[in-house]
Image: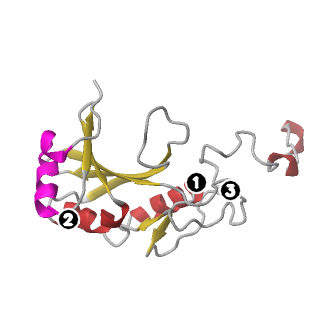
Amino acid sequence: MADTARSTANLDHPTFKLVKGAFPNKRFRATEFRGQSTLILEPGDLHEVMAFLKDELDYGFLSDVFGIDYLNYPGEMPGRFAVGYNLICFDRDDRFFVKLFLDPSVPTDGIEEDPALWVDSVTDLWPGAEWLEREVFDMFGIRFRNHPDLRRILMWESYPAHPLRKDYPVTGRGERERYRILDRTSS
């Protein structure tokens, strides 16, 4: 049974109440689905709330940073793109997700830098976020403010797009045609 986004006061995970108490003037949404709790933030609140989760609530391990493209997703979404963070507190054996939504302000069919697709980096809190954020940048075009080395990690530097965006064609834009086909005898 899927829960929809609602006030943090109605959900069971104790972290929701602690975050809401620490930031009473900030707007939060939250979901719980199959035992997994997700706090949904405004993009400008990310770094401050993540520092609180790490320093005050002992979420010392950032397991993953991931991007999602909700283009043509059934139902209404607060933004086309989402950036998610998977946090773990080993002392309590507790996993907690944080997510924020972004809406592009320019067409997304190329690599043009979009000022609406910027969020704060958490590499100063979790140094292991460096490569994870680079992957989200490379595949989705979401940029991270104050990142120490924001450059492509999977695609070559001059690659003309962000391939995990849903408006990127499955067959590519001519990239395959430029390469020589290798068979077993050509090695």
- Percent across and percent down for residue 110 are 69, 58
Residue 37 in view in this figure: no
**Are there few (<14), some (14-19), or many (20+) residues within 10 Å of tag 2?**
some
Mark 3 belongs to which amino acid? Answer: Ala
> Do the residues under discs 1 and 3 have CB atoms within 8 angstroms?
no
State the CA–CA distance, disc 1 to disc 2: 28 Å
Q: Identify the residue position indicated by label 1 in the image.
A: 139
Q: Main secondary structure of the magenta part?
A: helix
**What kind of element bears circle 1?**
helix
Q: Identify the residue position indicated by label 2 in the image.
A: 52
Is 62 part of what is drawn in magenta?
no
Q: Nearer the viewer, residue 59 or 99?
A: 99
Which quadrant of the structure image shows residue 72? Answer: top right
**Are there few (<14), some (14-19), or many (20+) residues within 10 Å of tag 1?**
many
Of labels 1 and 3, earlier in sequence is 1
Q: Nearer the viewer, residue 144 or 8?
A: 8
Of labels 1 and 2, earlier in sequence is 2
Magenta residues, start to end: 7-25
On screen, residue 92 versus residue 113, left or right, reads: left
In the image, residue 2 sits, relative to residue 97, either above or below, namely above
Residue found at x 65% / y 65%: 112
Is 20 part of what is drawn in magenta?
yes
In the image, residue 7 sits, relative to residue 58, either above or below, namely above
- Percent across and percent down for residue 125 are 30, 69
User: Which disc is residue 161 wearing?
Assistant: 3
State the CA–CA distance, disc 3 to disc 2: 35 Å
Residue 52 in view in this figure: yes
Q: Residue pushed farthest top?
A: 1
Which quadrant of the structure image shows residue 31? Answer: top left
